[in-house]
Amino acid sequence: MKNCLQDKLYFCIMALNTQLQNRSNNVCEICSEKDDNLQAYAVPPKNDDTIDNVVALCSNCLGKITASDFTDSNYWRCLTGSIWSETPAVQALSYKLLGKLKAEEWASETLDSVFLDEAITDWANAEDEMAANKVVHKDSFGVELELGDTVILTQNLNVKGANFIAPKGTVVRKIRLVPDNAEQIEGKIEGDTIVILTKYVRKQA
């Protein structure tokens, strides 16, 4: 049974790749360069669970996109063509990349001239909007805090609702991040779970 399941999984992966190759005619769906080693790139924030979410990219385009390398703006002039693709994933990725180049006159003009379905532009902008809305917790030195980190108090804290003062240097393990407030974390001190301001802690290396 295990081998059967493995065979089916392998077949599904190969079938998806074959579909993508057929759709792209074995050329990069962004720059139109022929590449025998095209790779599937899922347009964020979607994943690669369906061909509708992915774009066939050559190694050059894939490398520049994953490295956020847009220094050679002339390289990306291919987007003036790919934005008119009939494939939604290609449209979304092209629109997203053009947005990163909108300081270039040709890119700005292309964005102004194209009319895409709202669902496509929402998809293209989703990752940046998620990043802009992300609540980031930082310690007193500006170091980003993560769930489960260990922190050290940088000053004495009077614990409200308890009859003790947590001294400077107290170690607080396995902190939790307050989801809607970047200035607050939760941690246990002497068995009590309390809210601690991030400006009073430093992350333990």
Image (cartoon, rainbow, N blue to C red):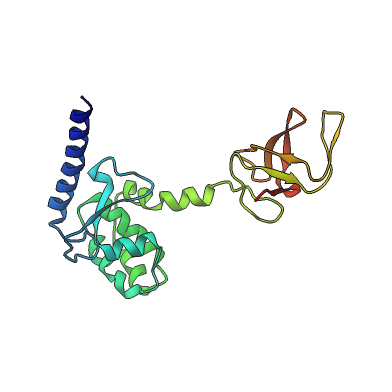
Q: Nearer the viewer, residue 119 or 61?
A: 61
Answer with left or right where residue 205 lies relative to residue 80: right
Q: Locate residue 100: give its quadrant.
A: bottom left
Is 136 situated left or right of 186 in this image? left
Q: In this image, 23 relative to 93: left or right?
A: left
User: Measuring 29% from the left and 64% from the top, which residue is drawn there?
Assistant: 61
Placement of the N terminus among the 4 image quadrants: top left
Tell me where residue 30 sits by quadrant: bottom left
* Above or below for 73 versus 49: below
**Residue 25, image x and y in percent?**
12, 57
Residue 7: percent from the left, percent from the top?
18, 34
Q: 177 and 152: which one is in front?
A: 152
Identify whether 74 is placed above or below 127: below
Provide residue 146's location: percent of width, then percent of height.
Answer: 59, 44
Report how many numbered discs are placed on residues in the image.
Answer: 0
Q: Choose between 134 and 196: the one closer to the eye.
A: 196
x and y percentages locating residue 197 in the rendered image: 73, 43
Where is 5 relative to 70, above or below?
above
In this image, 200 relative to 16: left or right?
Answer: right
Q: Quadrant of residue 93?
A: bottom left
Please tell me which residue is depicted at 87% across the width and 29% down the height of the picture.
163
Q: Residue furthest top?
A: 1
Residue at (20%, 30%) from the top-left corner? 3
Q: Residue at x 27, y 55 (%)?
A: 91
Front residue of this view, candidates 102 and 51:
51
Q: Is residue 42 above or below residue 103?
A: above
